Amino acid sequence: MYRCLPAAKRSKKLRYIVSAVLTVWPLAPLSAQGGNTNPDPHDVRAGSEIFNSICTVCHGQEGNQVPGVDLAHGTFHFAKTDQDLIHIIRNGIPGSGMPANNMSEASAAAVVSYLHQMAADNADNTITNGNADHGRVLYQSLGCAKCHRIGEVGSRLGPDLTNIGNLRRSAILERKLLDPAKDIRPENRFVTVVTESGRTITGKLMNQDTFTVLLMDPSETLLSFNRADLKQVTIEDKSTIMPSYRDKLSNQDLSDLVTYLKQQKGAPVQ
Ligand code: HEC
Ligand code: HEC
């Protein structure tokens, strides 16, 4: 995957880039707090999608797979400012393994917002290397399987966690356990419908179109409704049936449970 140039030529190219980068752009210090201190949530989400689709192949999901570069902690060889990062993301580093990416300045800036968000998430990250065996015990005793599935065990009501270790960073998993209502992904939303007879049913939103709403109720039964027959349809994007575990877990427990979840890297069983 790496395109190798002779060392001398490579370092000359890199020097050229470093000097271009350092002389042209004004300094806005990059750190967890520095640079763009208040990234727009839309940028962060757009940036995370780009990051996950094209950067993780080499940098890994935590951004630390390239030696000497830790994207989630602001550790770089050359980049000093957000502008440096945008330049490097768009143009690559010729002669190194970092390719140019054909994207607009705005998209590259969104990726940089996401890098800031990763750094901010990691700054208050209590997770180190927890005890996954104890994490599994907690997963069972706290009743996660009443709503979730790992492999073939558990419920289909909540998201399948079989591959969650590949999909989410530790900091995101930790936040989900502490403040579940804060970060509900669109694909995981629930819906509440009120029927003509006044019955209220809440369940996982499986599908919807102009005419119908399909949901899965808590007993895992699929229910299909004609919109015309419903008094009300509310997509639940601010509340979730998942409880907060803030008062139920010590810091050590939290890191054990997150460590266990990070190890779930299987292919979901359909
Ligand atoms: C094909 C593999 C590959 C892909 C894809 C890739 N990178 Fe890199 N990236 C590298 C390598 C290798 C380096 C280290 C280059 C060096 O310092 O010699 C690097 C370095 C970097 C740096 C550090 C610059 C510095 O100052 O040290 C940043 C920032 C970066 N990449 C961001 C990204 C982003 C964001 C994406 C996705 C848009 C991305 N990379 C995609 C391989 C890749
Ligand atoms: C009463 C049901 C319920 C229980 C109990 C529950 N969850 Fe959840 N969980 C959900 C639902 C529903 C969602 C999807 C909506 C949301 O994001 O809140 C969810 C979302 C999640 C997510 C985010 C998935 C993603 O795609 O990012 C994780 C991780 C998670 N739960 C882990 C756990 C763990 C670990 C436990 C046990 C400590 C647990 N949950 C207990 C219902 C539950």
Image (tube, rainbow, N blue to C red):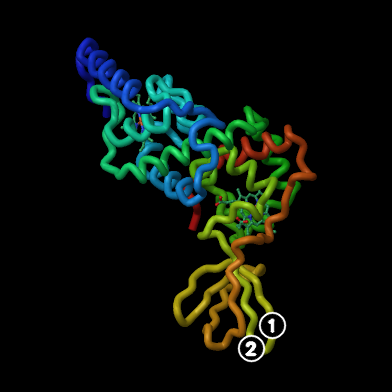
Q: Nearer the viewer, residue 53 or 164?
A: 53
Percent position of residue 102, x then y: 26, 42
Task: Identify the residue shown where x is 61% and y is 80%.
Answer: 232
Quadrant for residue 129, please give it: top right
Q: Regarding mark 2 in the picture, which secondary structure is present there?
A: loop
Residue type at mark 1 is Arg
CA neighbours of label 1 inside 10 A, class few (<14), some (14 to 19), many (20+): few
Q: Which mark is residue 148?
A: none
- Residue picked out by circle 1: 199
Quadrant for residue 197, please give it: bottom right
Percent position of residue 47, x then y: 43, 45
Quadrant for residue 191, please give it: bottom right
Residue type at mark 2 is Glu
Q: Nearer the viewer, residue 148 or 227?
A: 227
Task: Identify the residue shown where x is 38% and y is 21%.
Answer: 78
Q: Regarding mark 1 in the picture, which secondary structure is present there?
A: loop
Task: Identify the residue shown where x is 67% and y is 40%.
Answer: 136
Percent position of residue 258, x then y: 63, 39
- Residue picked out by circle 2: 196
Relative to 20, say whether 191 is above or below.
below
Which residue appears farthest toward the top when viewing the image? 8
Q: Nearer the viewer, residue 8 or 64?
A: 8
Percent position of residue 5, x then y: 20, 18
